[in-house]
Image (cartoon, helix red, strand yellow):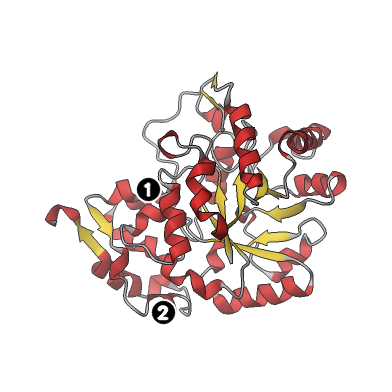
Amino acid sequence: MKFAVGFQLFGAKDVPFSELIEPYKDSISEVFFPWQDIPTGRSAAATRHGTTDWTAQARTEEELKKLKAMGLKLDLLFNGNCYGAYAISEKLSNMVCSVISHLENAVGGVEIVTTTSPAVAHIVKKHFPNIEVRSSVNMKIGTVKGMEYLADLFDSFHVQREYNRDLPHLRELKAWADKNGKKLVMLANSGCFAHCSGQIFHDNMVAHESEICEVDNMKDFMPYVCWRQMKDKANWHKVLQNTWVRPEDIHNYEDIFDTVKLATRLHERPTMVIDAYTRGKFFGNLLDLFEPSFTSATLPYIFDNRAFPADWFEKTASCDKNCHKCGYCKSVLDKILVNTENF
């Protein structure tokens, strides 16, 4: 089992991303990245409020060349949740083909394309049949039926996050995938709330972020469900009910996933995340590993990763997920919540 990590153009403390991850290259198989300002599951890479970093493309290409030279696969993201009026257009097809063809000439090509769009999957399958097409985790595909419906378009599937702690179900998906020549990928460190009722709204906002940032938005409305919840300390135990897997528990998935994705595209300390999961241990505030992280919402309190009970994984990987009827995570929060002002 190896890791797929998210590319950062600037890296930490202005150190090139390729240099940051070079010490971990033996544990990494893939690097996923967006292309400049094309809508993806995160903010635009090169332009903010009309100001463009005109060096971004050249620097990105140079970094991608170095990553390929390290033996890492490149995973190009077309995982925006909305492409508006161009969702099934020839314009979209031309744009996708143009980017992939350019990267073939500029850096030696990409091995994988990850997308939320069946239309983009169709485009890649039609024009670039040698590229692996992967469903984005934001498609929320978590059943055999879900994979069957799109088996002609996708070679691999990011499994819906909400099934990360259901190993029997994951092994059922794995059996189908093996039988049908498909691959499964897990996202291990998502900070997103499980079964978030605002995910579609949020993902659509991100796809249109360049437009949203240029208008006069409401000042008294918090659009993100998770941050609304985290305003109240009484809700903090819900973080424990989410989909992330601790570094100490990642070994339990070795017979299911060849590749585990680590969200690091926007993380302030990507190497901290990579180091924790490659070592299988982390001594610190568990919230610091997530993207998004809720560290700022809980300070001066932290979630001490060392204080988790020994039965944490066994309990959460076998429970019925009826969290509203159970008090286990609340009891665990009492054990791991530390007020740093007392240090």
Where disc 1 sits, the SS reads helix
Residue at horizontal 36 percent and vertical 50 percent from the top: 294
x and y, in percent, of residue 78 in the image: 68, 43
Residue 322 is drawn in which quadrant? bottom left
Q: State the CA–CA distance, disc 1 to disc 2.
A: 28 Å
Tell me where residue 250 appears, x and y as whole percent.
49, 69
Residue 301 in the image: above or below residue 11: below
Q: Which quadrant does the C terminus fall into?
A: bottom left
Q: Examine the rendering and report whether any part of residue 156 can be seen.
A: yes
Q: Is residue 129 left or right of residue 319?
A: right
Mark with earlier residue (1, 2): 1
Identify which amino acid the numbered label 1 is placed on.
Arg
Mark linked to residue 14: none
Dot 2: element: helix
Near-viewer residue (289 or 274) = 274
Q: Nearer the viewer, mark 1 or mark 2?
A: 2
Residue at far left of view: 342
Q: Which residue is mark 2?
A: 315
Other residues around mark 2 within 10 Å, as few (<14) / some (14–19) / many (≥20): some
Q: Residue furthest right?
A: 126
Q: Is residue 90 above or below residue 266?
A: above
Q: Nearer the viewer, residue 176 or 239?
A: 176
- Residue type indicated by callout 2: Lys
> Which residue is label 1 attached to?
228
Local packing at callout 1 (Cα closer than 10 Å; few below 14, some 14-19, many 20+) is few
In depth, the one of 167 and 198 nearer the eye is 167
- Residue 191 shows in the view: no
